[in-house]
Amino acid sequence: MPNKNSLIIITAFLSVFWLTLSGSFDMQHIITGIVLAAIISFYSNQLFDYNNMTIKLSKVMLILEFVFFLITEITKANIYIAKIVLNPSLPISPTNVKIKTELKSDFLKTLLANSITLTPGTLSIDINNDEILVHTLTYESAEGLKNWPISRILKKLEGI
């Protein structure tokens, strides 16, 4: 049976999140938010162990660092790809490269592959054990992935 305090906290958090997103504070939105949050909290308890959930500040900081670097890399890649597309000679050199990862968690490997795919000019094709096959628009992009800061951040996150 789930801990009542944790269910109340999660329900309150989800209710506030719902109200923030809806932008309406009438009775219909408040009741709908509370009911849906309670249902989600109760059923999600089967997926998560709220009783043993601890949040370490170092983990939160690494997640924020990951998000910051990902947004930065996406922005830089957008500018880089725009320059390539706007160049009349279209200087591309499509390349497939295998990126070795030291990550053990399938979730973090998938997160890394998805982060690569979110970055314009790159596409994760396959994950096989400790290698990710990536298609890049340019050779320079392929070389940049080999020492990508996001890989190091995810490695630190896995160690916590």
Image (spheres, rainbow, N blue to C red):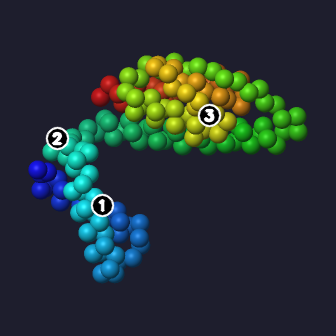
Q: Are the two marked residues, 1 and 3, in contact with CB atoms closer than 8 angstroms?
A: no
User: Tag 1, which secondary structure?
Assistant: helix
Query: What residue is shown with label 1?
Result: 14
Q: Which mark is residue 52?
A: 2
Query: What residue is shown with label 3?
Result: 123
Please tell me how many numbered marks the rendered image carries: 3
Crowding near the residue tagged with mark 1, few <14, some 14–19, many ≥20 C-alpha atoms within 10 Å = some
Determine whether, in the image, residue 46 is placed left or right of residue 81: left
Crowding near the residue tagged with mark 2, few <14, some 14–19, many ≥20 C-alpha atoms within 10 Å = few
Q: Which mark is residue 27?
A: none
Using the rendered image of the protein, determine whether residue 106 is visible from the camera's viewpoint: yes
Determine whether, in the image, residue 8 is placed left or right of residue 30: left
Residue that protrudes farthest toward the right in the picture: 88
Q: Residue at x 26, y 69 (%)?
A: 35
Q: Residue at x 58, y 31 (%)?
A: 124
Residue 31 position in % (x across, y down): 27, 75
Type of residue at label 3? Leu
Residue that protrudes farthest toward the bottom in the picture: 27
Q: Answer with mark 2 or mark 3, whichever residue precedes in sequence.
A: 2
Q: CA distance from mark 1 to mark 3?
A: 34 Å
Q: Residue at x 34, y 76 (%)?
A: 29
- 11, 79: nearer the viewer: 11
Type of residue at label 1? Leu
Q: Are the two marked residues, 2 and 3, in contact with CB atoms closer than 8 angstroms?
A: no
